[in-house]
Image (tube, rainbow, N blue to C red):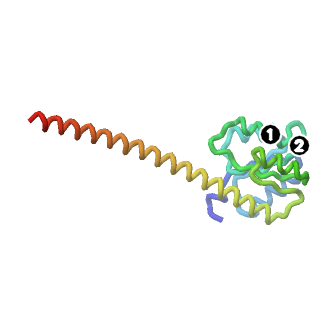
Amino acid sequence: MNQEIKTAKILIIDDEESNLDLLEDLLLDNGYTHIIISTDPKHGLLMYQQKDFDLVLLDLMMPEINGFELMALFEKASKPFPPPILILTSDSNHETRIKALNSLATDFLTKPFLLDEVICRIQNLIELHLAKKKLADKSTLLESLVQERTKELKQSQLYIIKSLGYAAEY
């Protein structure tokens, strides 16, 4: 696992302290260093709005604000590169899974989950997110280079036209 993936910013929101402890220990044991956890969905939303995360691990069944409501609030944050969301829930209902995947969720795992599967999915989602960000950055860079070259070309054309005008005068 490369350094960029290990230093990815991960937000975990789950109302069960034991789940947070398990996930945080799992991530730390696997070399991840930037982990923010929250048992309070409101606090999790605030963190999401204030920082740019590379992955969000989210429980669906929480008091006050459930995971679906939280994803709707995430969507209103209008981030240019929203992080992937991995749902970790005890609700194994097929309709719930489809509803989550049709909203902002990128992936879905049912509790209890296999720890090695969670790590593989986390790594894959982070790699994909970082690759998308790099691609967008390169696209922006290429777009600015094209604009710069177009401007230079227009200036060259104008110079040539002026030069031809002077030549025609002679």
Q: Residue at x 64, y 45 (%)?
A: 81
Between 159 and 73, which is closer to the camera in this rendering?
Answer: 159
Classify residue 97 as left or right of residue 169. Answer: right
At mark 1, the secondary structure is helix
Q: CA distance from mark 1 to mark 2?
A: 10 Å
Q: Residues within 10 Å of mark 1 (few under 14, many from 20)?
A: many
Vertical side of 94 occupied by 70: above or below: above
Q: Amino acid at mark 1?
A: Leu
Q: Residues within 10 Å of mark 2 (few under 14, many from 20)?
A: some
For residue 70, the mark is 1
Q: Quadrant of the N terminus?
A: bottom right
Vertical side of 65 occupied by 1: above or below: below
x then y, percent, for residue 106: 74, 51
**Count of marks, rendered view:** 2
Q: Residue at x 67, y 45 (%)?
A: 82
Classify residue 121 as left or right of residue 141. Answer: right
x then y, percent, for residue 64: 88, 36
x then y, percent, for residue 118: 79, 61
At mark 2, the secondary structure is loop
Between 51 and 116, which is closer to the camera in this rendering?
Answer: 116
Asked whether disc 1 touches disc 2, contact meaning CB atoms under 8 Å apart, the reply is yes
Q: Amino acid at mark 2?
A: Met
Furthest residue to the top? 169
Give the mark, 1 or 2, whose residue is nearer the N terminus.
Answer: 2
Q: Would you identify the image quadrant in which residue 152 lies?
A: top left
Q: Residue at x 32, y 43 (%)?
A: 153
Classify residue 93 as left or right of residue 131. Answer: right
For residue 62, the mark is 2
